[in-house]
Image: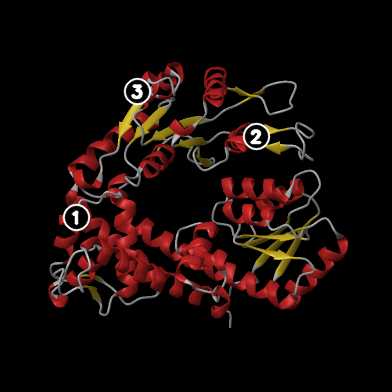
Amino acid sequence: MPGPRRVLVVEDDPPSQRLMSAIFTGAGYEVHVAADGEAGLEAVARVAPELMLVDLQLPKLGGLEVLEAVKAKHGGLPVVMVTAQHDPKPAVRAVRLGAFDYLTKPVDPDEVLVVARRALEARALEREVEELRRRLAEGGGLSAQMGPSAQVRALAEQVSAVAASGFTVLVQGETGAGKELVAQALHRESDRHREAFVAIDCGAIPEALLESELFGHERGAFTGAERRRAGRFELAAGGTVFLDEVGNLPLQLQAKLLRVLESRQVQALGASAQAALDVRFIAATNDQLEAKVAAGQFRADLYFRLAQYTLKVPALRERKSDVRYLAQRFIDEAALELKRPVRGLADGAAEALERYDWPGNVRELRNVVRRAVLMAKGSHVSRDEVRSLLGEPGQADGATRAEAGGRSLREIADAAARDAERAAIHAALKASRGNQAQAARALRTDTKTLYVKLKQLGIRARDFVP
């Protein structure tokens, strides 16, 4: 019989510690408490908790730094942030960094337990999906994730050849083609696979914060730097740093990155000395970096340092034989995650998917399949359901311009996309009982994007709160 669920509370305020302990102990949980950020990270390895609650304001190491370190080393562990601040910005940033949700002090005991239950349920579902992916990938490696085409097999052979080397690798390919999957495969097949894989989207972090995010900073390095903060490079110690869309790095930071690559040392903002850095760098871009070099927008020396070995990820339209395989895989995942009784593609549906050019690549295919699973009327996704989601006329609706009320194909596609988005958001909010952070994770988007969509579609999250 399994024992009680283990919860780690990282909180420096004794009354808050006692309150959280009482709430969870009374509900049958096994509770462990740490009084500062450093002790919290040590307790993660010792206790192996199934859930963490972390205060934003902690001594020695702040709550956001604890969150980043946990996500780098134990990505699946759900973390709920607790804050006494009325400013929502730090809490929103915590969700963007991977926090499951956040609570505001003074906490409500019932709300604490509801959020904890949701976090544990979401993690259990993630484990089911991960197990499905593991079974699908057994014996197949990268081909099991990306498809059985000859192009993918050739790419997998290159990955295996370079993974064990110390080369810095540049992964090139269109947005959504699978560059991060390739980077993860390089890490997984290397001798660093037991350490952290830290992915950094160089285009998603504001330029003013990017240097501190990468290199870290010391206390007092700039206004607002109240404590030392480890950078992403330091969090990846012994493992792999993945610089996604590296072409977006500003020139000033390109020079500093080059020094790190050459010296294998990093100097945090405000630090008086450099520290040794043991990481493997993998970069990715959808840009033609050679053209950016010629235009003076990217340093030639950094380009050649990053491109010690180059891998090209083919677009999905160049490997149509992978479409059917990937579609079935995404159906299996979505059916499990969305709790829908959909098992596969009906006659003609796979051919409709294969005819499409997929400008958004595998990411677009996955989104289309997820919407199809959500909206499917039977146990198999029909050809007309696929064609509708792709903006194509289906036989069932006649779909000439005249029969569609004079609307253009673009207008029909836009309307179908809005309907699909509305249905997906409704389902996610219903499943999460109005929790926007959890709904955003289920939809594989960020809370800001979901908030914008709610406004555009006139949906109120509070309508889904029981």
- Indicate the position of residue 417 as horizontal and vertical percent values: 33, 65
Placement of 358 over or under 25, stated as above or below: above
Mark 1, other Cα within 10 Å: few <14 / some 14–19 / many ≥20 = some
- Residue 430 visible (yes or no): yes
Does residue 103 appear left or right of residue 172 in this picture?
A: right
- Disc 1 designates what residue? 356
- Which residue is pictured at 75% across the width and 77% down the height? 26
Mark-to-mark CA distance, 1 and 2: 43 Å
Mark-to-mark CA distance, 2 and 3: 28 Å
Mark found first going from the N terminus, 2 or 3: 2
Identify the mark at residue 290; answer none if there is no mark. Answer: 3
Mark 3, other Cα within 10 Å: few <14 / some 14–19 / many ≥20 = some
Identify the mark at residue 212; answer none if there is no mark. Answer: 2
- Which residue is pictured at 57% across the width and 53% down the height? 96
Q: Are marks 2 and 3 in contact (CB under 8 Å)?
A: no
Under circle 1, the secondary element is loop
Under circle 2, the secondary element is helix
Q: What amino acid is labelled 3 in the image?
A: Glu
Does residue 404 appear left or right of residue 421 in this picture?
A: left
**Quarter of the picture holding the N terminus:** bottom right
Mark-to-mark CA distance, 1 and 3: 30 Å
- Indicate the position of residue 448 as horizontal and vertical percent values: 54, 57
Quick one: 91 or 198, which is closer to the camera? 91
- Residue 332 visible (yes or no): no
